[in-house]
Image: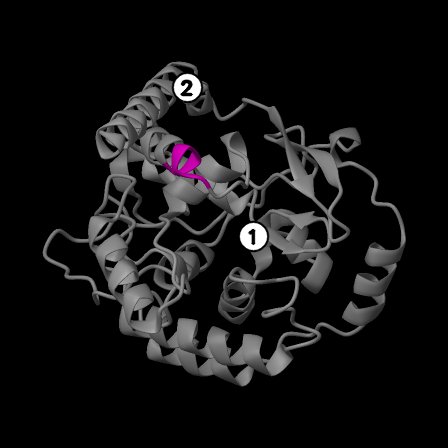
Amino acid sequence: MGKKKIALAVGGLVVAYACYIGVSLMFLPPVGTLQNRRTNLTIQVKDWQGNYHPYTVGPKNRYWTPSGSIPAEMKWAVIVAEDANYYKHEGIDVKAIKNAIKYDLEKKSLARGASTITQQVVKNLFLSREKTISRKIKELVLAKRMEEELTKGRIMELYLNVVELGPMVYGIGHGARYYFGKPASALTPRECAFLAAMLPGPRVAYNPYKNLGKVVKRSDMILRLLRSKGVLSEGEYRVALQQMPNIAGLQRKVDESIEKEVVPFQNVTAAIVPREPVPTPIPEGESSSREAPAAPPSAEPAGAAPGGEGNGAAPPVREEPK
């Protein structure tokens, strides 16, 4: 009799939790408003002391970099490093999830994630950082909706404008200025790979001042993938390998940023004028001239889980658009 009561109690809790999740899904924020590239929204980002600050996502952010001003090498660098099947999945990479589960079971830890770029955008814009089942379900639902309502190019634009690259350094526009003193449109392939290499952990593991060799090694791997997928020519690849990003004075910047209170990004609203990019074919009819090209249907991914150093991406088409 006691076991029956326990089973009924557990069943009741499961039903109650399912109802809670169902109700919470009814109140998820809409993603369709993000179709408008002039949309601005304010999110909360964390500094390196654990404090939250308002951050503007959209053209009112002085460092906002529209898709057409982001080099194709930058887009492909994050794809090969973070989400090899970006142009193949619809927000959720089931194969990557299976590989991550298998890897974690073998290592008896939660060492590998399987979040797609789309899921990371959803998490950064709409969800908290809590690690719960309900939050993960919300993330998966919103990722599917985002893929249905936004183009891949728009999702990539949002992703590259909210990623963390340093102490209160969010977005590729600010990252390019902070580390290299130039706009994102002027980044070299080596610099693109360098910034992409930092993404797993810019605070500690891939902090370029504390672990420069580790960042350079990972950026070398990313450059090799860009070459193997046809994003870089052999000449461009060799030139990139010979370059070493100049990050002189970085420690002073990091120390000062940690010691002083950071001014919220919400107060900075001047817009930048994007530099005219070099035309490259784009997926899904995007109007941006430097949009990352769509993967050919016949291409096969390397089969590694997103975030792993063995990820591959379908080769881009580099010919001039007709």
Which of the two residues, 2 or 29, is positioned nearer the viewer here? 2
Q: Nearer the viewer, residue 322 or 141?
A: 141
Q: Magenta segment, which residues?
A: 132-136
Q: Is residue 61 above or below residue 234?
A: above
Asked whether residue 264 appears in the rendered view, the answer is yes
**Which residue in the protein does label 1 denote?**
185
Q: Residue at image x 57%, y 61%?
A: 187
Q: Sequence order check: which comes first, mark 2 or mark 1? A: 2
In which quadrant of the rendered image does the N terminus lie?
top left
Please tell me which residue is depicted at 66% across the width and 34% down the height of the picture.
Answer: 44
Give the answer, above or below, for where 293 lies relative to 100.
Answer: above
Q: CA distance from mark 2 to mark 1?
A: 40 Å
Q: Main secondary structure of the magenta part?
A: helix
Query: Which residue lies at the image location 53% right of the left edge and 40% below the top edge?
Result: 130
Q: How many marks?
A: 2
The residue carrying mark 2 is 24
Please, what is the three-letter code of the amino acid marked with disc 2? Ser
Residue 308, image x and y in percent? 36, 67
| Quarter of the image where one finds residue 27 | top left
Q: Report if residue 135 lies within the magenta region.
A: yes
